[in-house]
Image (spheres, grey):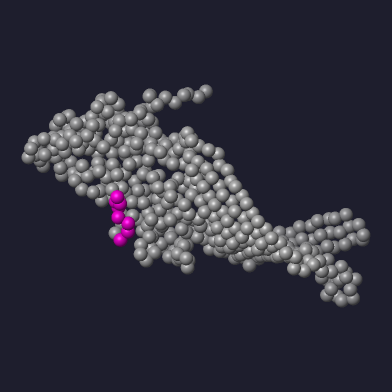
Amino acid sequence: GRQRFNDQTFFGLGPVLPFTLPIASDFEYAYATQANASIERQLTRDISISATYLTVNSRHLPRPIDVNAPRTDLQIENFRRFAGRDPLNTTEAIAFALPTMRATTDPFFGMFGATIAPGQLFTAAGRPFAAIIPGIIAAPFDPVSRTADQTRRVITPAIANFFRPTAPNYFLAFAASRGAVTQAVLDSQLAGTLRTPGLLSPFGSVNAQSSSGSSNYNAGTLEVKKRFSNNFQFLGSYTFSKSIDDSSDLQTLLLPQDNFNFNAERSLSLFDQRHRFVFSGVLQAPDSFRSSNSFVKRVLADFIIAPIFEISSGRPFNILSNQDTNNDQSSQTDRPSVTADGTLCIPGNVGCTPLITNNMFSTGNLGRNSGITEMFQQLDLRVARNIRFGERFRLEVIAEGFNLFNRFNQAAASPFITDVNAFNERTDDGRYRSRPTAAFDARQFQFGLRLNF
């Protein structure tokens, strides 16, 4: 059988707690509205032309939001209280821990290494502190006035659960103190820190499924077709379309780069394809060829040729930095920034977006789905011939070829900034190319026989 999960007896999994996927209380099922208008005109007895406009608007599309995303402004301020300066990188802001042992020789107090007790003084990051809960909470100490500033207490970031809104990581505090620091003990000393008490929660990320996504698709299609007559028919169509949404990227599990800025996710859809042209036709040898006196015509009799040619635009892909640049404890959604010359860079690096913007760790300013694959071109051909055996039997010999010119058609590209910069190619409208990672099928042939009777 199954055991019911009890968060009051959960022993914890260290500094990083597991995530959960709840459903938002105001979740609504998605719906779409569609409208189209068409006009068709007959040009000749066998040829017609038509124009069609299609629009599809979807609302309440599902997408997750981490309602327990870390407050990076508090991470930064907590580090400032600890080190007296801004962090040099995102890791520094959350990786430090208050010591439980004094240094062998303390530069301020001249004490030898020993376990730090509550109220005792120690030095960390070159600054004096008074221990509140050793290894967990401390207060900056002023050697001149000989007082500790209890309004600017520092807390170990992992114990603070990296300043997620729900609660500190009570499990880690209990384990690190060998059972001495319970929830009640920790809560009693949080005043003066940037961490507030909360529920005893066993979760880190809480990716609630919301229904705030939306999409918009508009397309215009021009089509010319000829019905079968005079031994041939054809259909040619051109589509100009654009699809925009804010939640179609399964590569990042639909999660946004910044849980506090969903508007930055609105962009071209992954399946957006601006131009698409397809031509198909069927050409059949006239019946008169079978009884012709011409040897060439008799050889060509009963042949059917059917080509399909397609050329279409590439599709967008999302470009990722593969680093947790905004320190939300997830590296799968972060995008890079763009320098003045179009080169992509990691926020915080020299010449790029500053590490900290508006007292928060910066997010990349590159829009979602700013990459694009190469255009698609392919010619397929079907050739068939009927071999007749009297009046009742007919054997159809079929040969089909796909991608006859064996063109490399890119199906996917590497989304990572290193590959994009190394590829160093952009389109005229500023979109980025990248190293191909997948391709559509190479040239293929297949043959068949079909007996009709």
Residue 344 is situated, as x and y percent measured from the top left of the image, at 38, 60
What residue do we see at 54% from left, 55% from top?
Answer: 243
For the view shown, which residue lies furthest in the bottom direction? 294
Vertical side of 135 occupied by 1: above or below: above
Vertical side of 111 occupied by 265: above or below: below
Q: Locate residue 124 relative to residue 215 in the image: left or right.
A: left
Residue 45 is situated, as x and y percent measured from the top left of the image, at 80, 67
Q: Can see residue 122? A: no
Whether the magenta-drawn stretch holds residue 354 is answered as yes
Whether the magenta-drawn stretch holds residue 68 is answered as no
- Magenta extent: 351-358
Majority SS type along the magenta span: loop
Point out the image quarter for the C terminus: bottom right
What residue do we see at 26% from left, 37% from top?
Answer: 194
| Residue 231: quadrant of the picture | bottom right
Front one among 247 and 185: 247
What residue do we see at 20% from left, 38% from top?
Answer: 152
Residue 326 is situated, as x and y percent measured from the top left of the image, at 35, 48
What residue do we see at 41% from left, 63% from top?
Answer: 422
For the view shown, which residue lies furthest in the right direction? 391
Residue 346 is situated, as x and y percent measured from the top left of the image, at 35, 56
| Residue 180: quadrant of the picture | top left
Q: Locate residue 103 relative to residue 324 in the image: left or right.
A: left
Front one among 356 and 28: 28
Q: Can see residue 184? A: yes
Q: Locate residue 101 relative to residue 344 in the image: left or right.
A: left
